[in-house]
Image (cartoon, rainbow, N blue to C red):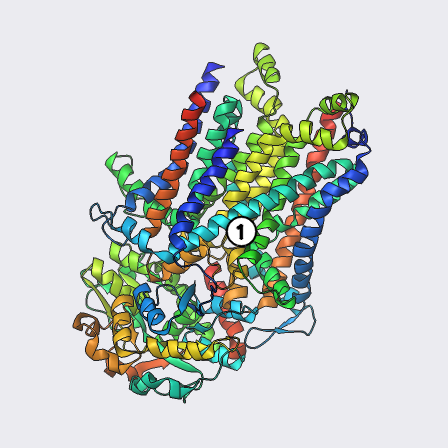
Amino acid sequence: MKISSHARWALFSGRAMSWWLLGPGLLWMGLLCFVPLCLIVVISFAGRGTYGGIVWSFSLTNYLDLLHPLYARILGQSILLAAGTTLLCLIMGFPLAYYIARAAPRRQGIWLLLVMIPFWTNFLVRTYAWMFILRTEGLLNTLLLKLGLIATPIELLYSNTAVVIGLIYGYLPFMVLPLYVALERVDRTLVEAAWDLYATRWAVLFRIILPLARPGILAGCLLVFIPSLGAFLTPDLLGGARSMMIGNLIQHEFLVARDWPLGAAISCVLMLFVVGMMGWSLRVAKLLSQQEHEL
Amino acid sequence: MRSKWIGLSLCLLMFLFFGNAACQRPSGDAGQKTLHYFTWSDYVGPELLAEFERRHGVRVVVDTFSSNEELLAKLQGGATGYDVTVPSDFMAAIMIQQGLIAELDLTALPNTATLEDHLQHLPFDPTHRYAIPYLWGTVGIGYDSAVVSPPPDSWAVLWDPRYTGKISMLNDQREVFGAVLRSMGASMNTKDPVLIEAAKARLLVQKPLVKAYASEHYDQLLASGDVVLAHGWGGPVARAMRDRPSIRYVVPKEGGTLWADCLVVLKSSPRKELATQFINYLLDPHVAARTAERLLFASANKAARPFVPSRILDNPAIYPPIDLLPRLEWMTDVGEALRMYDRAWTELKMH
Amino acid sequence: MKQADGWLWRLSLANLLFLYGPIAVLILFSFNASRLSATWQGWSLQWYRALWANQALLAATANSLLVATVSTLLALLLGVGLAVGLEGLPGRRQHQIEQAMLLPLVIPEVMMGVSLLLFFVLLHIPLSLTTVIVGHTLFNVPVVMIIVRARLRKLDPRLLEVAADLGASYWDALRYVTIPLLRPAIVGAALMAFTISLDDFIVTFFTAGPGATTLPLKVYSMIKSGMSPEINALSALFVVLSMGLIGLSLLLQRR
């Protein structure tokens, strides 16, 4: 017997009450987030002063500038990297999240803390640690050479590979936590029933567990993809600043080129892209879950 | 769930631990005058600050930034509360033009009488109305003399294919373009689009040889042997010398950047008199000498030289030889031409 | 079944190794006698001593912890309110508000930082630690909301029916049924928000005023004058303290 979420709460004539709960959050975010953002959108149409200030003359110049193929390339490459990072994070984080979700309830808290603790150390310092590991004479190469697995050192640092490793490392908990929250509610009896019916490991995974964990997967992917898209410290340090990601570009425009209107325009374009992508993915998710319901 | 309490007690414990240690120096006024100093990290040693605090009965609160552009972004955004800050020369020029800097009372700054000759008249502020030079130096090439031979004397060595994958350049568009332009015999402040395009072409040729563009940790790269040629400021190269004695520093014959970080008082400061006294204190010969020794940058005060240890004074990475000066160039703001540099730099990175 | 379990355990272990590898490196180098993290030159405790004397670094750490704690608590209040309150609205409205609330996570951090700076300047609000906390809540609230709502959707509505049948009011049901059921999600969200806040750099940079330097800001500006292993020492202390507390709680749970 499935009651719609609306009906559930309507049991308590919740609508009026809901606004008490919603009110503070909406007010806070509305005033402190949306108003400033509107400011930025307005600025994206303004002009740049010679010394980096804002000239309040409005035009589409900035957006027209962005039509140059160079910027499309930057966006494209950033999307590829972010997508790769997200996928790998999902593949890596899923077993861990599942393991924690199935562990004894007392232990779960400890496991989660264990996952979080590395991220209470400073991000920059962790990145420097990765540089030490991935360097030509770094830990990894020394180990592999000693074990005889390779003959010459692998040039890992200052490449896109290193950037992806760094990004995965930085955003893994953002994937594990939402996954854990969703997986924890997966009814174990369903999984056991599948085993009893001699389903293969993969069938259990793809037909039962994954669909049930879908909201967690979506949340985790979003929480990893979006910051990865806008990252700039990691490409700078682990990538040797050899390529420009969109995060670097935005930071460059705001802080180095001192062209705030152009930076604002790039940010707006990025924002539009991500919002569009999110809307599309949410619609797909809804379609899939509707199909399920019909079955 | 107990983990909630673990988390909370963890926070509390750590907060108490560190808060206690830091409480010996709380930020904000407590009936005592406070001076807010906004500077590059570690530009003043805590022991030097303590002396000023004792002498004048005030507390100095230090906040830091790591690039000129960040400083400007903060100040342009309207941040107030800072009293003294240390922009680089061209940034000081911009800040003056933007009306962010207060005029100085030179009678309260006796230590400025003995500034180095070449710093007596800054191009953007000849009479020291606004900015007083504090530390100065050059941008050149740090190299490992055990690997790079013959000893380089030209920017061209950064294009030498023998050192492929062992070269690092600064991650700074003006400095990198400046180096190429000088190697082509042009000014680093050119606004000529043809020259900028030519410079970009040369940089694109160089890119496969470059291991990384790094403005921060090239001293570590040099010391560890990851690179044998590093484009950089003298100070960090001097740091690397301590760990790998075969490292040397050279300013190429085509010339390079002359830079000077300047002390300024912000117009929004409510304590301009105290700020001026602070500037004078930082330029005091003994304080300046200790600063040079600690930070590995040359002091702008000539009168400090007798008190600087000879290993610092004789190190060309720290105290540039005076005969270098004719081939050095101040970096100036290029105005609208910055857009051309921006676009070229972005294209270089995307290649 | 057992085979799958074995694999699961191995994969999880590999993940943990991946997570803690760099941490082990960090801790190792906090004992390095050399200043540069590139070369190993023997054991030394000098950086721990230097850390204790480094007032600025310790003050920055205290700031970071304060900001993280306050912004997490605030975000929990506002975020859980949002997550639960949204249930009372029709489905379409829910979606609209949800998507709107995701906006702070979607935009590049630089954009958020700059917009906040401009906003504060226009309203003549001086920058300080408070403005940093405000900035942090802007990304913490959506994070809390997402995590709590992911869990909320899985709740069994029958439990609420039971509560209604037993005569519970809206607020009672909230307190005694919904919130306890949401506790894992709330704890998870709190952990996440705290972590994000501790490490945040960009938004903090734009909203920090005089005396409001947090740890990431301090570290970032320290790298110009050479990464000092004092930071490694600090990180090592963080890790050891956290592990110690976990060990303690394990002991307590045994009783």
Residue A292: where, in percent of width, then height?
71, 25
Q: Is residue A104 in view?
A: yes
Neighbour class for label 1 at 10 Å: few (<14), some, many (≥20)?
many
Residue B293: where, in percent of width, then height?
24, 69
Q: Residue at the spot x=53%, y=40% of the render?
A: C192
A195, B288: nearer the viewer: B288
Number of numbered discs on residues: 1
Q: Residue at the spot x=58%, y=27% of the render?
A: A183
As drawn, B46 above or below B114: above
Quarter of image, res A200: top right
Check disc 1 and report its element: helix, strand or loop: helix
C49, A178: nearer the viewer: C49
C170, B346: nearer the viewer: C170
As drawn, B254 above or below B78: below
According to the image, label 1 marks what residue?
A: A78
Identify residue type, mark 1. Ser
Q: Label 1: chain?
A: A
Q: Is residue B186 in view?
A: no
Quarter of image, res B190: bottom left
As drawn, B17 above or below A101: below
Residue A270: where, in percent of width, then height?
62, 54
In this rendering, position of residue B183 left or right of residue B193:
left
Q: Residue at the spot x=64%, y=57% of the render?
A: A269
Quarter of image, res B166: bottom left
B130, A225: nearer the viewer: B130
In this rendering, position of residue C59 left or right of residue B113:
right
Looking at the image, which residue sits at the far front? B31
Residue B124: where, in percent of width, then height?
44, 85
Split into 4 quadrants, where in the image is the N terminus of chain B? top right
